[in-house]
Image: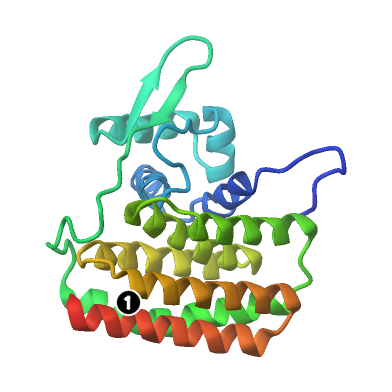
Amino acid sequence: MAAPPDDVVSDPQDDLAAAVLRPLRAHHAFESCVEMLATSIRLGIYPDGSTLPPERELAERMGVSRSTLREAIGALRDAKLLTTRRGRGGGSVVEFHPEEPGASPKLQRPREELLDALAFRRIVEPGAAHAAAKRTLTGQQAEMLRASLERVNSAAGKAVHRQADAQFHLAIASLTESPLLIDAVTNVQVRLHEMLGAIPVLDRNIDHSRQQHDAIAEAILAGDAFKARRVMESHCDDTAALLRGLM
């Protein structure tokens, strides 16, 4: 990801969206487009009340035709995730109010699949943290990571915190600039989001998680790949233990 010119101020949230919304490789472009946009909305990359980028920009970013994108946006409208405003200042506006964790205890996926996602996460996310720390980050990338960390630490409410937490992990994956790693972490975070939404969130766990996030970000920014991996492994283990106990 190239750094912007000195006179251009980049929005870290836009940088994260650009990393997650990438050209689709699947044959079923419509279904994949719906899934990617819905994931970006549910994980708060496009939060409630925000407006999606213009259709031309989104279609180019995702590598689909504008007609396919319009069909996907229409499906998200039908699912009550988006509304369309006409006229100047209009566009596709996100209408998604995340539920408080524990409000929907019923899991949508088989328990075995979700537990397997925890094992997969234990491999993928520490590897992503290690890879991110080994890279020489641009100022823009470092700012995106710091901004993602600040969103977690300042999140008002547990539902917003859950979204910001996912964005922090996606920001780390995006620093690797590996499409396969970004896909893997995104898939893990979708499943983790479902699991954490099914259990009550404990304040003590949030405090501990924030300390680990701080340590992970500090290690990545310092280029300490082994510490970044080690702390992320502990973070994944603690979350997995909590979920296995309460889910």
> Under tag 1, what secondary structure?
helix
- Position of the C terminus by quadrant: bottom left
Which residue sits at x=41%, y=44%? Answer: 37
Q: Position of residue 125 (x, y in %)?
A: 49, 77
Q: Looking at the image, how many numbered discs can be counted on the residues?
A: 1
x then y, percent, for residue 214: 58, 72
Q: Which residue is mark 1?
A: 117
Is residue 171 placed above or below 213 in the rendered structure? above
Judge the density around disc 1: few (<14), some (14-19), many (≥20) Cα neighbours within 10 Å: some
- Image quadrant assignment for residue 179: bottom right
| Vertical order, 89 against 227 (above or below) | above
Residue at coordinates 54% horizontally, 32% vertically from top-left? 53
In this picture the colour scheme is rainbow
* Place of residue 162 in the rendered image (x, y in percent of width and height, measured from the top left): 37, 59
Query: At x 43% / y 27%, what residue is drawn?
Result: 92
Depth order, front residue of 208/213: 208
Using residue 174 as the reference point, say whether residue 45 is left or right of it: left
* Residue found at x 21% / y 67%: 199
Outermost residue to the left: 106
In the rendered image, residue 219, in percent from the top left (x then y), is placed at 67, 79
Quarter of the image with the N terminus is: bottom right
* Residue type marked 1: Ala
Extreme residue toward the top, this view? 87
Q: Nearer the viewer, residue 222 or 211?
A: 211
Residue 170 located left or right of residue 206: right
